[in-house]
Amino acid sequence: MEDKNLHMRVYAVVPAYKEEGRIGAVVRTLLSHVDRVIVVDDYSGDGTAKEAAAAGAEVLIHALNRGQGAALRTGTEAALADGAEIVVHFDADGQHDPDAIPQLVGPIERGEADIVCGSRFLGVAAVGMPRSRQTLLWTAQKFSTAVVGMPRNFTDPQSGLRAMRAEAAREIDFLQDRMAHCSEILRLIARSEWRAIEVPVKVRYTKETLAKGQKATDAVGIVWHLFLGSLQR
Amino acid sequence: MVIQYVLLTFFAIALGLTLRRARQGAMSRVAAFLWSALWIGAAFVVLRPSLATSFAGFLGVGRGVDAVLYVAIIALFYLVFRIFLRLDKIERDITLLVRRQSLEKRGSTVEKE
């Protein structure tokens, strides 16, 4: 707990689906950077929940698999109900670097920003990101600014790493259950009055994270869900 | 022709079902009216195929059957899209239920501690 000169109550929310064997290490490293870790087990049916709890996280369990966005939202609501002052969204598969958390939380604590998103394209090279993934994300970035309404100065449309001041987290009312929540959150940020910035983060791509991560064909589904979502309510 | 009897029977059954559902209140008045109009209109076209031909002439399409097919495809597309939207809404509702259950369970365990 070295860098606990944090004076705001920081919660990390980790949506997890079948992360047995990885989630424990993620929770342990996270706990050295934040006050509490909430893992939302999205009906994995394996040892994910047990492993996360043993590592010191509070575990919420979805009774049905509802997707990453849905799990993230459940965890966020739990954190806010607990009185979290800063909510950090963090991926369970170990591709995010917990050492990036001070960079995410710092600007909020210093009052410089309300929302801080991690970007894979701000100078720090991702380790092992394949060219195909780079091209996909470049296209997604152009699409997201033009059609979805991502803030124009943002570089990473599908980053799952972000920190939000509680008031902002409460107001960012994202409803996309699956992968489209990233784009949806960015659009909500762009339309809000909150001060949002990006900071560079390093992401580690391994065989496992790539296998579980998104494929180019998922982009079609994301666009489709955003379209359907725009017609709801 | 046999096909006329087959289709007329089908439309009669469909109309009967529509009216029954409407009486049970399972269908809005507007929906019941639109569906009834569709079944009755279709029955008219089956009885007087020349109606479809004149409709096709009005649209500028060659044959009556073609015009009926085009209209049917557009209607099907629209209905499928409506179903997609409805499914998306149901998915969202399921998520809300799952979330509420998960958070309530948490609330009860926290109180016990």
Image (tube, rainbow, N blue to C red):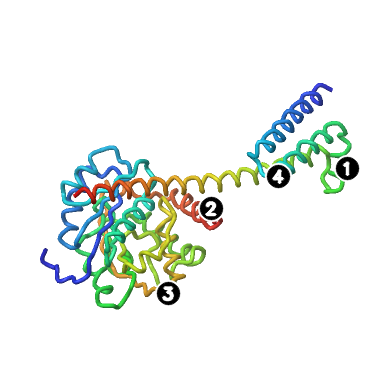
Residue toward you, A183 or B31: B31
In percent of the image, x 25 and y 58: which residue is there?
A96
Q: Chain of mark 4?
A: B
In percent of the image, x 36 and y 55: which residue is there?
A73
Instruction: Please state if A201 lies on the left or on the right of A171 as rendered.
Output: left
Dots 1 and 2 on the same chain: no
In percent of the image, x 36 and y 45: which residue is there?
B101
Looking at the rendered structure, which numbered label has been put on residue A228?
2
Are the residues at dot 3 and dot 2 in contact (C-beta closer than 8 Å)? no
Dots 3 and 2 on the same chain: yes
**Would you name the residue on which mark 3 appears?**
A193
Earlier sequence position, callout 1 versus callout 4? 4
**Would you name the residue on which mark 4 appears?**
B29
Identity of the residue furthest to the left in this view: A2
Q: Chain of mark 1?
A: B
Question: Of the residues shown, which amino acid type is indicated by label 1?
Answer: Ser
| Distance of label 1 from label 2 (alpha carbons) | 38 Å
Q: Nearer the viewer, mark 2 or mark 4?
A: 4
Q: Please tell me whether mark 3 sits on a helix, a strand or a loop.
A: loop
Question: Of the residues shown, which amino acid type is indicated by label 3?
Answer: Glu
Residue toward you, A39 or A142: A39
